[in-house]
Every structure is written in C-alpha cells, then in structure tokens.
Image (spheres, rainbow, N blue to C red):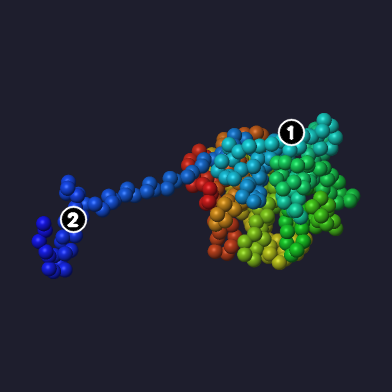
Amino acid sequence: MLPTLRTPLAGLLLLALLACKKDGSSSAAPPQPAPPAAEATTFRNPLLASGADPWVTEKDGFYYYMHTTGNNLTLWKTAKMSELGSAPSKVIWTPPASGPTSRDIWAPEIHFLDGKWYVYFTAGPGNCCGGQRLWVLENSAADPTTGTWVDKGQLTLPGQGVWAIDATILEQNGRRYALWSGQEPGSVEQRLYIAQMSNPWTLTGRRVQLSRPEFGWETNGEPDVNEGPQVLKRGSKTFIVYSASHCSTDDYALGLLTASSTADPLDPAAWTKTSTPVFSKDPADRAYGPGHNSFFKSKNGQEDWILYHANADPGRGCGGARTPRMQKFTWNPDDTPNFGDPAPLGVALPEPGGE
C-alpha cells in the first residue's frame, strides 16, 4: 500500500509514477512523424510533339485546346494544362473533299459567346495559300466535345472577300469585335485589321487597319507579316499581342499594341505600337521563331500564362516541327506584360498554380 501523500506536490509525483509503464516508458502517445513535404509538381515543354498556332480557353474547370493540324479541326479537353499531352482529343470537323474550306486548315480558336460555342478558323480551296479566308462553326452543347457543329459560313464584310487569316475576338465598351490578319488588294503584305460584329458570325460596318509591318524586326522573310493577333487586358489597358516577320524565319517574334480599356478600338490613333519585340528567339533554350500565342489563367486564378509555338532547331520554318509550349509571365510596374525569355526546352518547370 502506498503511503498517504499529504502535499499537492507529492500528489503530482504519485500521478507521474502511476502514469509510467512497467517498462519505464510513458503512456503518452509517441510523437508522430512529420507529414511528408508536398511533392513539387512540374511539367516540361513541349506540351505536345507538334502543334503550331496553339489556342486555349477555360470554362467550368476545363481547358479546351486547339492548334493547326492542317487537315481537320481537333479539340482537346483537359482539367490541367500540364497534362495536355495525355488529354483526350476529338476531331470535331472534317473538311469537304473540295470547295472553299477543303484545304489548309489553320489557326482554329474556340470561344464561348452568347451561350454557345464558336470555332473560328482559316481555310482555302487549295493551292496554298491565296484563297485563305475566315470561317465560323457553332455548337449549342454545354460541352463542345459533344453536340453538333453547324457551319455558319464565311466571316467577312460585304464586298471585301479578300485574303484573311487568324481571327480572334475582342470585347470592349459593351461591343464585340473581330481581329484578324489580312491583305490589301494587289499586295501580299499581311496587316492587322478590326471590324465590329453584329453577332458571333457576322461582321458589320467597315474593316480598319490597326498595324502593318514597319520595323526591321517585323520584316524578316517574305512577305512582311503582322498576324496572329491576341487580346490581353490589365487594369486600364487593352493589349493586342501579335506575331511579326514570316514564320519561315527564326526571327518570328511577338509585338505589342496598347490602348486604353475605354478607347474606341476602331480608332487607329487609340493604339500605340511598341518599337521592339516583346518575345523573341532564344537559341540557348532551343526556341526559334516563338510566336502565334494565346493566354490563360492558372486554375487558382493567380497566375498569367502564355501559350506559344516555337521550333527547337534553327531553319525549321513553318512546318510540323513547331511545338506548343507554355510559361508563366509577369507584369511591369506600368501594367504592360513582361514575357521574359522563352523557357528552356525539356527542363522541369512548376505547374500552373492549382494543378
């Protein structure tokens, strides 16, 4: 029998003794090992083995991706852009055997507008590439990998059935506009144009020229080229990021037009062109002719990413060697984009936030 302990301190000592096991160890739970550190998630460029003119948009937690295949319209669907290489794809449209949309299927973009899906693409009748024009498909299904794609015809203005490629969409001041690369009659120089839209498949009013090749870095190769316009917004500014110089050269690069977010985009004077390229080749990182890009937000909504194509080796030109790549970009203090240099090819990079 244990003797009676008369002081509070003695009582505490007794409790401590009783809490000890016979083997001398404490009855308290042993310390748990620290949880393993979260594994760093990475990806590597290129995202696919081939794919020029990459385009992506996001809706309801999924990214919908397209690029030039040349002979059809193929749509990829993925919850993570870093897993594009293993994502399912589906051919959503096959061209007819002949006619104005039968050959040279280029630069498709999928947009969700007014509750429906639209694909804007370039095609021609063959004998590349003087017959290239812009065309529109429509799908009312919630998931664009399902449903039926309906041909909405050519995207053009009456009486202006001239050469046109690379359509994209700008929305500003409650109005919708189409941007594209086109030519003047009798000229092969590619310029950037804009026109207002009355609905997702119809242009209205007049086309307005916003940019033509004028600086030396825009005029490498033949013909001189401004093409692939893409819209980017930040604060009080609207940007058009475009590709310049011919894709056959290693000097294909990105340029920048800037306007106020409240300006009339049909006013050429509202746009200011940056005199130097904002993204260009980096031989050390095996990025030749980087361009024809698009943009997307990371899944957590905190990061801005640029998606573009480039060749891994010099002299590969406009062919199937161009691969889609992506990298995060930042913003300068004046709210202009800072794309940096092309990311190294084949090097592990952090995945977009939230993936």
Q: Residues within 10 Å of mark 2 (few under 14, many from 20)?
A: few
Which mark is drawn over residue 98?
A: none
- 345 shown above or below 26: above
Answer with left or right where residue 145 lies relative to residue 98.
Answer: left
Q: Residues within 10 Å of mark 1 (few under 14, many from 20)?
A: some
Q: Give the amino acid at mark 1.
A: Asn
- Horizontal and vertical percent for residue 185? 84, 47
Query: SS for tag 1?
Result: loop
* Residue 293 seen in the figure: no
The residue drawn where x is 73% and y is 38% is 92
Answer with left or right where residue 108 lies relative to residue 36.
Answer: right
The residue drawn where x is 84% and y is 32% is 98
- Horizontal and vertical percent for residue 100? 84, 37
Q: Which residue lies under the disc numbered 1?
A: 71
> Along the line of sight, which residue is nearer the eye, 46 or 13?
13
Query: SS for tag 2?
Result: helix
Q: Which residue lies under the disc numbered 2?
A: 18
Answer with left or right where residue 59 lies relative to residue 20.
Answer: right
User: Looking at the image, which residue sits at the far top?
Assistant: 97
Q: Give the amino acid at mark 2.
A: Leu
- 271 shown above or below 318: below
The residue drawn where x is 57% and y is 45% is 80
Nearer mark to the viewer, of 1 and 2: 2
> In the rendered structure, which disc, 1 or 2, sits on the residue that comes first in sequence?
2
> Along the line of sight, which residue is nearer the eye, 54 or 281?
54
The residue drawn where x is 52% and y is 51% is 353
